[in-house]
Image: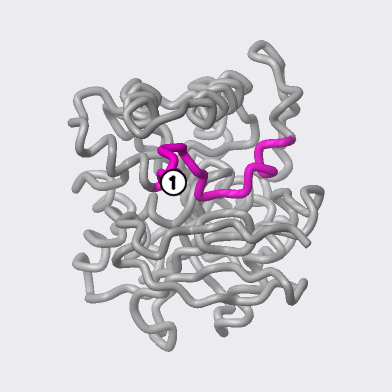
Amino acid sequence: MRKRRRVPADNPAFADLTVTPIQTRDARVCMAVHVAGALADPRLPLVCLAGLNRNMSDFSGFLSYFKRLGPGDWPTLLIDLPGRGRADDRIAATDYGSLADARDTADCLAALGISRAIVLGQGHGGQVAMALAAAHPLLIAGTILLDAGPVVDSRGIVRLRNNLAHIESLRGSKAVTVGLRRMLGGDYPGLSDDMLDALALRSHWLDKRGRAQPLYDRRLLAPLASINFDDVLSAQWPLFDALSVAPLMILRTQLTDQLRRETYEEMVRRRPDALAFTIAGQGSPALFDQQEEIEAVAKFVFELNAGRVKKAA
């Protein structure tokens, strides 16, 4: 039997994010869900899905501010799908994929009695949102894509894979801390060491030997092993087109290497009704802790709920 991945109970990244386990179709595997606000609220809930090897802590800054905006504590779900954060790992490595994640997201919403929602997906979470729209269009009241699109940038994949392999090769807490700061510093120029260290705790923790242990199943990265820097990955425009069932917002961080500018511009061209917004001065995953971008997302959510945002005919 495979050893259960350890997640320290006192990891500060999860301090304010209590979770409830929700079973997948495999009873041995549970997702982890944080619920803010009341799901009985008639307002459309906002569902947040993190990147490939990321977890709900990437939305902690966003959630803290978002809850204080508009008409009170908006119903919001942060979901750690299998293999991420405090969710269980899948039984087999081959069970991972955006289609399986979309299925689990749909099952999670059904278990919580949610028949319609606004989905915010960052990176891989955005690909899950597109797959969810294709399989369950009636679930989608609106979509917010953040550094996500139908074409994944191979440069970002290779950089992510190499950076994570380097971090796990380091020995000693000092070397790991310096390595994590260097890895993150390029995406967040000007961020203090303390803030970089806090950001690092969203993806790794240090064991007693001073080694970085991931807050994700390493097998998530297995499909990335064969991708090269100059590969051109297959475009999935039909999945993007599935989002036409509802209004759309497209966000891109200025320094991201996950979503090429030309892909972003083509997405905007194909969906001229979409709200488009660039988050300045940072890369992926977005810190999502600044007033301007949070209020832009909040306005989209609030107006969509009120019926004032229209999708293209």
185 sits left or right of 88 in the view: left
Instruction: Identify residue for label 1.
Output: 207
Residue 114 visible in the current orientation: yes
Q: Residue at x 23, y 74 (%)?
A: 71
Q: Residue at x 45, y 64 (%)?
A: 78
- Whole-percent x and y of residue 174? 32, 29
Q: Nearer the viewer, residue 63 or 55?
A: 55
- Whole-percent x and y of residue 213? 50, 43
The quarter of the picture where residue 116 lies is: bottom right
Residue 265 visible in the current orientation: no
33 sits left or right of 93 in the view: left
Q: Nearer the viewer, residue 201 or 271?
A: 201
- Classify the position of the N terminus by image quarter: bottom right
The magenta stretch is 202-222
Q: Is 203 part of what is drawn in magenta?
A: yes
Above-or-below relation of 40 to 222: below
Question: What's under tag 1, amino acid-wise?
Answer: Asp
Q: Residue at x 28, y 29 (%)?
A: 280
The quarter of the picture where residue 204 lies is: top left
Q: Is 193 part of what is drawn in magenta?
A: no
Above-or-below relation of 23 to 135: below
Above-or-below relation of 17 to 83: below
The type of colouring in the image is one colour
- Whole-percent x and y of residue 107? 67, 73
Q: Nearer the viewer, residue 200 or 95?
A: 200
133 sits left or right of 159 in the view: right
- Residue extending furthest toward the top: 230
